[in-house]
Image: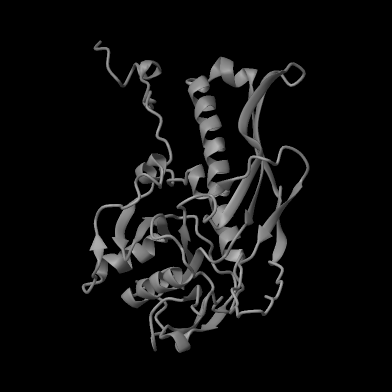
Amino acid sequence: MTQSTVNTTAFIEAQQYSQFILDNLEDYLLPEGMWRDVSDFGSGTTLNIKTVGTVTLQDAAEDTPLVYNPIDTGTITLTITDYIGDAWKVTDDLREDGSQVDTLMAMRAMESTRALAQHHESRLFAVANAAQTGAAVNLVNGRPHRWIGGGSGVTTRTMSLSDFVAMKLAFDKANVPAGGRIAVVDPIVEATINSLTNLVNVSNNPMFEGIVTEGFARDHKFVKNIFGFDIYTSNHLPIKTATEAINASTYSLANTTAQIGDVANVFMSVADDNTKPIMHAWRRAPSTEGWRDPEGRGDKFQVTSRFGFGAQRVDTLGVILTSGSAY
């Protein structure tokens, strides 16, 4: 009798498993150079930072004493607010019976660290968005720093060329350095930019490669430089959970209402630590540790992180709200 697949089923392994493990497609993440790293915060949970205002000059005249004006001072605070982590365990039985378990655990550790990094980036933008007053234009030197995209008389909530012009003017009036201006936008906004046919003052090369770190330029998709802003994309920008009405018609911008699901696109300066709008401190950078669990007959692992973000200035910060779906 012929030995065939019909009478030798015990030796047929119908299901085969490749040595290749398919990984997730991860979002690109921000480097630490996007915020001021507060290095003098070695202990405690709240740091107080002194601020100094501007000087107002006065007219002088012969034989007339000047008025002795004090300079405005104040404080801002940075608080350790976030304490997050992840933990997992692999049993001895799985190690004994499974295949590529060590590879699985190594990938699990990387995915866990990656999840913390994604949370970290989303918190940066959430703090930047919360630093402004909602449902208001947030004037700085007479120009708005928060509005809804579209332009004058438009209610589409999509980014327009006039929005870039207005944000450039807002930063110019606020004396924000021309070098180091960036905008982080949702990929939906990139689609809008790509569909604009009347773009002017545009470059397809980033201006601030020496300011924006190589990690950022490598891992975030650069779109264009528009009116001095290097435009990059992120999937971790704040999403509106409530409507927000802003009337910026006085400034030839939109008078409409942002809807639930709309995105807060963040414009900022990263020229130096003095101009960055957001500050940050690590109390514990993401780190993975593992130990043997003899009673549970397995190995345990965990990764934890403690940090805090805070706004140190709002005059170098801008937000344009746009639709989360329309372009």
* Residue for point 24% across, 56% down: 204
- Residue 129 lies in what quarter of the image? bottom right
Q: In this view, does 240 lie above or below 99?
A: below
Q: Foreground: 152 or 70?
A: 70
Residue 2 coordinates in the image, percent (x, y): 24, 12
Q: Is residue 136 visible?
A: yes
Tell me where residue 107 appears, x and y as whole percent. 50, 30
Q: Which residue lies furthest to the left in this view?
A: 197
Residue pictured at 37% horizontal, 20% vertical? 9
Q: How is the image coloured?
A: one colour
Asked if one can make out residue 263 in the rendered structure from this viewpoint, the answer is no
At x 41% / y 58%, what residue is drawn? 181
Query: Does residue 255 appear to the left or right of 159 in the view shown?
Result: right
**Residue placed farthest to the front in the image?**
63
At x 44% / y 85%, what residue is drawn?
Answer: 251
The location of residue 161, given as percent across then percent down, is: 32, 74
Between residues 222 and 84, which one lies in front from this camera angle?
A: 222
Residue 277's image quarter?
bottom right
The one nearer the camera, 218 or 168, is 168
Q: How many labels does the image show?
A: 0
| 38 versus 326 height, above or below | above
Residue that sits furthest to the top in the current view: 1
**Where does the C terminus fall, quadrant-wise?**
bottom left
Q: Is residue 24 left or right of residue 65?
A: left
Q: In which quarter of the image is the N terminus?
A: top left
- Residue 290 occupies which quadrant of the picture? top right
Q: Where residue 53 sits in the image (x, y, percent)?
A: 64, 65
Task: Give the side of residue 138 with respect to residue 268, left or right.
Answer: right
Q: State the residue in front, 283 or 47.
A: 47
